[in-house]
Structures are given as C-alpha cells and as structure tokens.
Amino acid sequence: MTVHLLDHPLVHHKLSLIRDRKTPGSLFRALTEEVGLLLAVEATRDLPTDSVVVETPLERTGTRRLKPLDPVLVPVLRAGLGLLPSFLKLLPTAKVGHLGLYRDHDSLVPVPYYRNFPPLLEARPVFVLDPMLATGGSASEAVRQLKSAGAITLTLVSVLAAPEGIERLQKDHPDLTIVVGAIDRQLNEKGYILPGLGDAGDRLFGTA
Ligand code: PRP
Ligand code: URA
C-alpha cells in the first residue's frame, strides 16, 4: 500500500484551524474544502493523459490532456460530502458515486445504508472521499464494495488518519493508495482520533 502524507505549510495551517473546537461550522466547511483542494492535487498526480496537439495564438504545440474516460468520486456519507466540492472543482466532469455508511456506536462496525455507483468502474480511476480514517472499518468496507462492483484503481483521500486505520487498510487492501493530510497519534476507547478534530460529520453539518 502507498501512503502519501501531505507535508505542506498550508495543510498544517488549515489543519490547526480545523482542529480548533472554537472554529464555527461555516469556517470548518470552508477549510475542509481548502484542504480538499490540496489533497486533490496530490491524489490526481498519476491520472493518465494523452498527447494532443493544440494551436496557441502563436503556433502549434504538443501538450497533454486527461484521458476522456472520467474518474469516479465516491464520498462516504456523510462526512465525505465535505471533500466533494474540491474534487469536482478540479475534475468537473467526474462521475459521482455515493456510499452511505455509519459506524455503530458500540461495535464501531460500519453499517451500510445506501449505495449508488456509476458504470464502468473497472476502467476508471476511483477516488474514495472520507475525511476521517479511524479504525479503518468504514474505508475498508467502502473499498471492498467498490472492488466487488469492479473498481481496480482505487485511492482513498482523508484529512486525518490514525495509525490503526492505516494498519487495517494495509492488511485488507494492500493494493490501495492513500492520500492524507496528517497521521495522528492514536484512537481513544470510543474510536475517535487523538488529537483529531472531533466528529467530522457533526462539525460539517451542525448536528452535534
Ligand atoms: C465517520 C467518518 C468515517 C468513519 C471513520 O463517519 O466520516 O466514515 O467515521 O471511522 P472508522 O475508520 O472507524 O470506520 P460516521 O460513521 O460517524 O458517519 P457520519 O459521517 O454520517 O457522521
Ligand atoms: N469519525 C470522526 O468523525 N471522527 C473521529 O475521530 C473518528 C471517526
């Protein structure tokens, strides 16, 4: 498994604000989108391109364009929705799949409740969007469902990860690529990331 950790001053700065419990929901959402843009730049680094020739106002030149078969973005509901606008900004023609999962409060096992994937998953790069990689149960289940629907080239994009979650994915999906803004210290006894940022879904959508 490949893990890309975004060690960038803008990510450090924005994460310091995202983590702050005093940051209001509107700013939390905006900052998640901004970090999402930086993650998206890194996550799309290996997208395949074709050679093309264009006429600039001055001359013909060889250049490159993304291959025509659009990538797929799959936000894991709910919190993954916070990263979707950034990815759609850079990949406006991407197809969007949705996957609804919530963690059972006691067992921490992900419970699936909704799924709608676009066609041709096997031929497209697929980006799974979920700001939080904690125990890794939700991400592992998302990747499992996408693989069983045909996806081959999969990248998980998260704002924060716990070492436990990375270890779990390394075991379950060694072929996965992960792009992450920070790797935190550990999980607490309730499966929350420490130091973390709290409950991403609640902070994004004001449901705390
Ligand atoms: C959060 C988060 C991940 C999951 C991570 O979702 O968005 O999907 O927990 O935890 P894990 O790695 O231990 O599985 P949650 O289940 O709270 O649902 P929500 O986004 O609807 O609030
Ligand atoms: N989900 C969250 O939203 N936050 C955590 O710290 C762990 C799981």
Image (cartoon, helix red, strand yellow):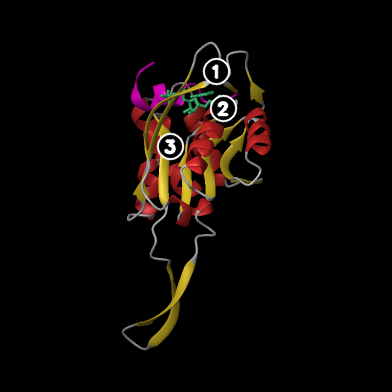
In the figure, is residue 93 to the left or right of 165?
left
Which residue appears at 53% of the width and 42% of the height? 156
Q: Is mark 2 within 8 Å of ligand 1?
A: yes
State the image coordinates of residue 108 (x, y, percent, origin top left): 55, 18
Q: Is mark 1 within 8 Å of ligand 1?
A: yes
Q: Which mark is residue 108?
A: 1
The N terminus is located in which quarter? top right
State the image coordinates of residue 58 (x, y, percent, origin top left): 34, 88
Label whose residue precedes the other's in the sequence (3 or 2): 3
Residue type at the position of mark 1 = Leu
Residue type at the position of mark 2 = Gly
Mark 1 Cα-neighbour bin, 10 Å: few <14, some 14–19, many ≥20:
some
State the extent of the magenta-drawn residues as a range: 194-208
Task: From the image, tell me which residue sits under label 3.
Answer: 32
In terms of secondary structure, where does tag 3 sit?
Answer: helix
Q: Which quarter of the picture shows residue 56?
A: bottom left
Q: Is mark 3 within 8 Å of ligand 1?
A: no
